[in-house]
Amino acid sequence: MRIATWNINGIKARLETVTSWLEQSKPDIVCMQEIKSVDENFPREVFEALGYHVETHGQKSFNGVAILSLTPFDEVNRGLPGDPEDEQARFIEGVFSTASGVLRVVSLYLPNGNPVDSPKFPYKLGWMDRLERWTRERLALEEPLVLAGDYNVIPMPEDCHDPKVWEGDALYRPESRTAFRRLCNLGLTEAVRASDDAGGVYTFWDYQAGAWQKNNGIRIDHLLLSPEAARMFNAASIDKHVRAWEKPSDHVPVLIDLAA
């Protein structure tokens, strides 16, 4: 089973790019972030025509997450628990039946947190605390779980072109990186690093200052695997070439292959 995560940066602007990639890569499950669409305006029929079941948790103009799956959904849960006043659409969980049993897949869009001297940074850290609590509860089920998405966290110095540029940024602040490590230390496997520990492996290149042409990127899109999912893990890859397509997102798809 092939599972992908991709911050598409707006479904309206990226529909042709996404459908072309789906036809080329043929993933079984796709986790999307920043769909920037309310649920009723998401072009689900385009993806249904490709054989996908579609579930969204949308929001007008910004945020929004979705899961596309060739396998029907058994269950869908929207919104990260822990803060009833949080109305931002950043979290959706799909539950599936596979030949190996149940599989849980989350598409998440973790807050950016900038500027750090605004309420946005405490919101980011609070969201990460809630994610840690939720994950701890899900891990107690001892089921395959994949947490896929744009984490807006640069975990290590080798995950960015120039660490000095990112000092003080919410994506690289010690508090953000520590919270990410706490999450991983629950027993999760970071899929890309489990298969490639080299530097210069990125998933995001800014539109400005020729970042793509200079390979001035960062790695902020991650797939974290529960122990049960990690035992099924075969490979991880990054479809870097998609960044060079016409009208690209500033992120590229990240994929894993599971024996499921």
Image: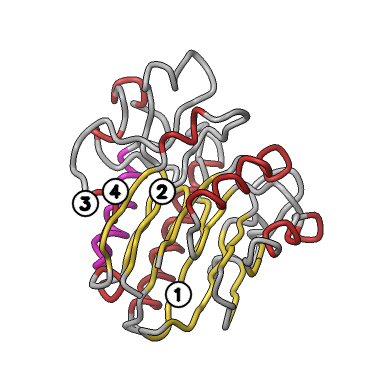
- Magenta part of the chain: 174-190
3D distance between C-alphas at marks 1 and 3: 22 Å
Residue 189 lies left or right of residue 95; in this view the side is left
Instruction: Indicate the amino acid at tag 3.
Output: Ser
Instruction: Residue under label 1, please give it.
Output: 104
Q: Earlier in the sequence, mark 1 or mark 2?
A: 1
Instruction: Residue under label 2, please give it.
Output: 254
Instruction: Indicate the amino acid at tag 4.
Output: Thr
| Marks 2 and 4 in Cβ contact (< 8 Å) | no
In the displayed orientation, state which residue is furthest to the top. Answer: 209
> Which of 80/243 is in front?
243
Q: Residue at x 38, y 28 (%)?
A: 217
Residue 131 lies left or right of residue 54; in this view the side is left
Q: Earlier in the sequence, mark 2 or mark 4?
A: 4
Instruction: Residue under label 3, please give it.
Output: 195
Q: Residue at x 32, y 65 (%)?
A: 225
State the image coordinates of residue 85 (x, y, percent, origin top left). 66, 62
Q: Secondary structure at mark 3?
A: helix
Residue 259 part of the magenta-drawn span: no
What main secondary structure does the magenta stretch of the protein show? helix
Instruction: Indicate the amino acid at tag 2.
Output: Val
State the image coordinates of residue 114 (x, y, percent, origin top left). 51, 34
Instruction: Residue under label 4, please give it.
Output: 178
